[in-house]
Amino acid sequence: MPLARKRQICLTDTPYYHCVSRCVRRAYLCGEDKFTGKSFEHRRQWVEDRLLFLSTVFAIEVCAFAIMSNHSHVVLHVNVEKANDWTDKQVCSRWHKLHKGTLLTQKFMSTDSPLLTDAQRTTLHATLSIYRQRLTDISWFMRELNEPIARKANHEDQCTGHFWEGRFKSQALLDEHAVAACMVYVDLNPIRAKLASTPETSEHTSIKRRIRDFKKGKQPTTLMPFVGNPTQPQPPGLTFNLIDYLKLVDLSGRSLHPNKSGSIDIDESPILQRLGLDEKSWQCLFSSFETSFSMAAGQINTLNKYKRRRRQASIS
């Protein structure tokens, strides 16, 4: 029996989650239907555009993504502090990018000092509190991602009914080892599926977007940045180095093919060593991430703590 979503996603455990959405009825998210010859490749851009747009609306950052032929992967980070720092106007403005809101919220945004009764202010405050909470809710994020894509696909296919499975799959990423492994797993999806030969040619993936912007000397504004391990306070970001991560993805991708080999400069401290993982453990993590873990991922000690909080059997 599936575990309730509210028990799968708990921000006190971790703000990082891996989410997977899969199509039903042999529906195509992108790619080409071998039976009819019809191409659905343009739908891949639909998903990428919508995903990156939502990252500018929600207090949820995209760490990694890959859009496949009948499913999509996203690694998300929920930033509750960011949402709490927004003013009521900012919350309302962001929600109105997705929905019309209510007559009261429209009146609130229409003028700098709307004339509201005490009852209206109470109602407005309650409504904005709901909006603020939704803007940090992964279930709402995935709903806002998938529903518009389903409507467009159904309109294009001239049919009705479900396009996505009823529930998206979510995995809690309990530590930085799990975050790194899951991001590599997601970024290498097209290579494992033989849709691309290198990360830089993997269309509609976070790794290609990062590589493209890295060549320009910047990081994508719509993806959670790599900040390394800074000594000075900085905006939230992934606590490893971008260059190290690119090397890690490339090296991990090479190990998917036994007849190829790769290495990192001997003067460079390997990221696996810094994360406390040996090569065998890392190979297991990134090559079969989705099947190796169920609802949560992490090292044995962090997984056991997670399970004890949920009164589940520990891992020996």
Image: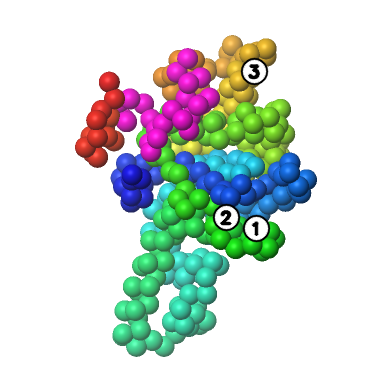
Toward which corner of the image does residue 82 lie, by quadrant? bottom left
For label 3, the SS is loop
Residue 32 left/right relative to 145: right
Of label 2 and label 1, which has the lower sequence position?
A: 1
The residue that appears at 51% across and 19% down in the rendered structure is 283
- Residue at 57%, 17% (x, y): give it: 268
Estimate the x, y position of residue 66 in percent, counting from the top left.
60, 40
User: Mark 3 Cα within 10 Å, few/some/many (few <14, many 20+)?
Assistant: few
> What is the three-letter code of the residue carrying label 1?
Ala
Residue, disc 1: 153
**Extreme residue in the front direction:** 35
Element marked by disc 1: helix
- What is the C-alpha distance between the residues marked 3 and 1? 35 Å
Q: Could you tell me which residue is drawn at 43 percent across and 28 percent down?
A: 292
- The amino acid marked with disc number 2 is Phe
Q: In the rendered structure, find residue 257 and report the number of the disc placed on it.
A: 3
Please state which of residues 89 and 193 is positioned toward the viewer in this rendering: 193
The picture places residue 86, in percent across and down from the top left corner, at: 43, 62
Residue type for callout 3: His
Give neighbour class at mark 1: few <14, some 14-19, many 20+ (Cα, 10 Å): many
Crowding near the residue tagged with mark 2, few <14, some 14–19, many ≥20 C-alpha atoms within 10 Å? many
Q: Are marks 2 and 1 in contact (CB under 8 Å)?
A: yes
Label 2 sits on residue: 163
Sequence order check, earlier mark of 3 and 1: 1
Task: Looking at the image, tell me whether mark 3 or mark 2 is earlier in sequence order.
Answer: 2
